């Protein structure tokens, strides 16, 4: 997964032609380390064309504040430069693995994102 910061956020996320899953994480976050392999697998799978990037929330306070992070990990799905979905432990009652799976399933149902 590519690391993104305030410097390249617009280029890598907002201006991306692909949907982008942004994973806000921190080195001290155990759940962040738990979902990282899942996100890498989603990106490597290639069945859904998308980009997965990560942002260290501790080092990118401006972005963390801009997107009003309340807990880590937080996953944001951007499509066409717009924030479409948000998943965090509070919104999914702690089952972030299920949220990641739900994200993948919702992407795969979108006809414009399916591979030919």
Image (tube, rainbow, N blue to C red):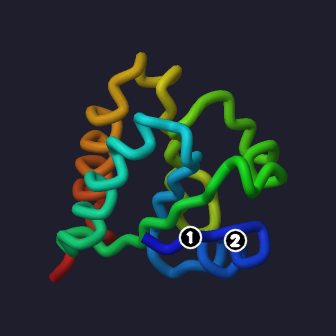
Residue that appears at 42% across and 24% down: 92
Q: Nearer the viewer, residue 55 or 100?
A: 55
Image position, residue 20 (x, y; %): 48, 65
Image position, residue 90 (x, y; %): 52, 21
Looking at the rendering, which quadrant does residue 112 occupy?
bottom left
Furthest residue in direction front, as rendered: 28
Drawn side of residue 21 relative to residue 61, left or right: left
When the figure is inspected, residue 19 is found, relative to residue 104, above or below; the finding is below
Q: Nearer the viewer, residue 80 or 4?
A: 4
The tally of labels here is 2
Q: Residues within 10 Å of mark 1 (few under 14, many from 20)?
A: some
Image position, residue 75 (x, y; %): 50, 46
Q: Which residue is mark 2?
A: 9
Image position, residue 114 (x, y; %): 23, 71
The tag on residue 3 is: 1
Drawn side of residue 62 relative to residue 77, left or right: right
Residue that appears at 23% across and 72% down: 44
Looking at the rendered image, the quarter that the N terminus falls into is: bottom left
């Amino acid at each position: 997964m590519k690391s993104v910061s305030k410097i390249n956020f617009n280029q890598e996320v907002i201006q991306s032609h692909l949907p982008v899953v942004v994973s806000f994480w921190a080195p001290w976050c155990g759940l962040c380390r738990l979902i990282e392999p899942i996100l890498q697998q989603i990106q490597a799978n290639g069945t859904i064309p998308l980009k997965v990037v990560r942002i260290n929330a501790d080092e990118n306070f401006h972005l963390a504040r801009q997107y009003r992070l309340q807990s880590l990990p937080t996953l944001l799905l951007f499509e066409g430069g717009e924030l479409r979905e948000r998943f965090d432990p509070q919104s999914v009652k702690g089952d972030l693995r299920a949220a990641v799976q739900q994200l993948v399933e919702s992407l795969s149902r979108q006809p414009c994102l399916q591979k030919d």
